[in-house]
Amino acid sequence: MNINSGDTAFMLVATALVMLMTPGLALFYGGMARKKHVLNTIMMSLAALGLISVQWVVFGYTLSFGPDWQGIIGGLEHLGLQGLADKTLPIAPSIPAFVFMAFQLMFAIITPALISGAIAERMRFGAYLLFILLWATLIYDPLAHWVWGGGWLAKLGALDFAGGLVVHISSGVSGLVAALVLGKRRGYGHEPMAPHQVPMTVLGAGLLWFGWFGFNAGSALGANATAALALVTTNTAAAAAALAWMFLEWLHHGKPTALGVASGAVAGLVAITPAAGFVSVLSALAIGAIGGAVCYFGVAILKKKLGYDDALDAFGCHGLGGTWGAIATGIFAMDGGLISGKTDLLQAEIISVAATYLFAGIGTYLILKAINLFLPLRVEAEEEVTGLDLTQHGEEAYPDFTLGGPLSSQLGMK
């Protein structure tokens, strides 16, 4: 082994930063939910942190990064992480294999958690757990292998620096399909469903932005010039998208909002993810600004026009933002992009986007329909009205401590 201590230290920090993104996502989504559903919304991210950590160690990693089988899936040589201890990998020769495995685990965790934003406030928690376990195994793991594990999209020449295809398009498209299968929330379009606590969402967005430096810069798999480029392009795109969303909202609705700036920043982070290590800083500025506009259109106009209930805009930000980012990679990549007079990369990116849409969309539909044969996907109407915090978890985020409330009852007061 020829382990580089600097690269290893950098990747350990990057792994921790990406791990922080899932609790950040829990706050980002939780603040946008109504207060009777906030704990359930947060639980969907926290549960993914536990469930996918176990799945990845037992068999998820080997399906994604085991020896290639027909360009489709990884072999089973690394079941239970066998053969990884005290070794390095060709894909990351300067860090221990366990560090690479742990870094990739954090991507595998947050991706199914992103889907929860589309189906918030109406899915049974038990059905959700089974869904993300099957989705991670049957959708995420093969897709990660196709792109990063030596599968057919990698052989085609598609580029995805940190997960535009694998993370964002897959989760966004799957979220849209799941939202359509589950149906709209009760009262959607007729009752107010405003975010219950915007400061929580802004805090979550800040943690996501912070963690995204590990997400993108860490995908260089070492402390090197590519990591530095990815960090700068990431911040630049996020800032440009936040401004683009803010000004578009200002023009469209007359006032800029904190929720809009937070959403715009996330849209820019999504858009730059597939391109972060391949494009110039000025290209990142354009990718972010256009990404903010694309996602604003998806959230503020397209969703209302088509009438689907993507509750917390998983498709609007991640599906559309990831789509633009993947195509932008084919346009702006310094080596092989359309700006260099070549078209092969752009063609590969378009094929990879189409393949991800079809695979994630059809696969998600089949998984949900199969689960529904044995376990209802959606809560009963009365449970939805009462709130998923109480009906699914038996607790409240904001209990009533006034006279006659829970605290008064505990103290024996009437």
Image: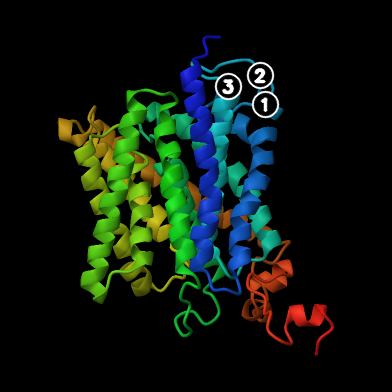
Picture coordinates of residue 339, whole percent (x, y) = 16, 35
In the picture as drawn, the residue positioned furthest to the top comes out as: 1
Q: Distance between the Cα atoms at labels 1 and 3? A: 10 Å
Query: Badges 1 and 3: C-beta atoms under 8 Å apart?
Result: no
Secondary structure beneath label 2? loop
Three-letter residue code for mark 2: Ala
Three-letter residue code for mark 3: Ala
Question: Would residue 6 be visible to someone looking at this image?
Answer: yes
Query: Badges 1 and 2: C-beta atoms under 8 Å apart?
Result: yes
Q: Nearer the viewer, mark 1 or mark 3?
A: 3
Q: Residue at x 23, y 29 (%)?
A: 336
Dot 3 alpha-carbon crowd within 10 angstroms: few under 14, some 14 to 19, many 20 or more: many
Q: Say which of 351 and 234 sits in front.
A: 234
Secondary structure beneath label 3? helix
Asked which quadrant contains residue 379, the reply is bottom right
On-image quarter of the C terminus: bottom right
Secondary structure beneath label 1? helix
Q: Residue at x 25, y 31 (%)?
A: 344
On-image quarter of the N terminus: top right
Residue 85: numbered disc = 2
Q: Residue at x 21, y 40 (%)?
A: 283
Instruction: Please tell me whether residue 266 is drawn above or below residue 67 in the rendered image.
Output: below
According to the image, label 1 marks what residue? 81
Pointer 3 or 2: first along the chain? 2
In the picture as drawn, the residue positioned furthest to the bottom comes out as: 414
Three-letter residue code for mark 1: Leu
Asked which quadrant contains residue 42, the reply is bottom right
